[in-house]
Image (cartoon, grey):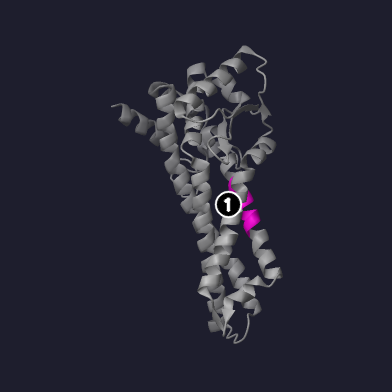
Amino acid sequence: MMRILLFLGTNVAVLVVISVVFRLLGLDGILMESGGINMGALLVMAAIIGFSGSLISLFLSKTMAKRGMGVQIIDQPGTPFERWLMDTVERQSKEAGIQMPEVGIFDSPDPNAFATGWNRNDALVAVSTGLLQRMNKDEVEAVVGHEISHVANGDMVTLALIQGVVNTFVVFLARIIGHTVDRVVFRTEEGVGPAYWIVSIIAELLLSVLATMIVMWFSRYREFRADAGGASLAGRQNMINALKALQRQHDPQDLPAGEMAAFGISGKIGSLFSSHPPLEQRIAALEQARG
């Protein structure tokens, strides 16, 4: 969950900053032609703003995750368990056809893990101290396999592209709504009035909520693929056991907001804003595939 929150948070921040810069520089003015709106120029501007936010978030994702979660990178294993963890990541990476990611551990009592990075050959896989303490090696191996699968599937890149597309439409539609209200309701005849800016900002915020629902849908979908990948790398039963271990230790509804649940599980069951599907559904999908 934290990986997704960091990505979305950075994306929104960059989106807002670039939008403000465009307005301060008067670049929005190129959209107006003879009292109308230049759709081509608007689409180009929306794409620049939209993809800037998502791509900057993508390139900063690993650095932000390290700092935000306090990840300690394992350069030289200091314990037999760290050596086993490094060997497991290395073996699974080779099987998945990717270069070995950086491996790290962060301090958290909960069994958590995440993978991030701007491309599949420059990634980070990190696990919490709680995960290492509360799960056996087979279950930890399955969790690592799940995260390696996220990397191999290029999920962060795909997420960034999807976010860039929805950002583009958010900016595009918000400007059209602002322009329409400014012209039709407030009857501004030349240039743009205050209503254009105010309505555009409000529309951008509201449309961003709808855009987040689309991004979260993709996030839920990719979890099933990562579970299947983890089952392939570490064994289907180990993947099922790891998910069941999480069920025994956490009720997703009790997790505090902003806390990264294991594999990023959080939010209310069935919620459109949940980044991950319910554990029961993920376990059922693996059991059905086995059958």
Return the residue at label 1.
Answer: 54
Is residue 91 visible in the rendered image? The answer is yes
Spot occupied by residue 30 in the image (x, y as percentages of width and height): 61, 75
Residue at image position (51%, 71%) is 40
**Is the residue 89 above or below the residue 209 in the image?**
above
User: Is label 1 in a helix, a strand or a loop?
Assistant: helix
Nearest the eye: 31 or 283: 31
Spot occupied by residue 232 in the image (x, y as percentages of width and height): 40, 26
Residue at image position (48%, 18%) is 138
Is residue 9 visible in the rendered image? The answer is no
Spot occupied by residue 37 in the image (x, y as percentages of width and height): 54, 78
Q: Amino acid at mark 1?
A: Ser
Asked if the stretch drawn in magenta spans residue 14, the answer is yes
Examine the image and state in which quarter residue 108 appears: top right
Spot occupied by residue 158 in the image (x, y as percentages of width and height): 49, 46
Per the rendered image, the range of residues in magenta is 7-15
From the image, which quarter does the C terminus lie in? top left
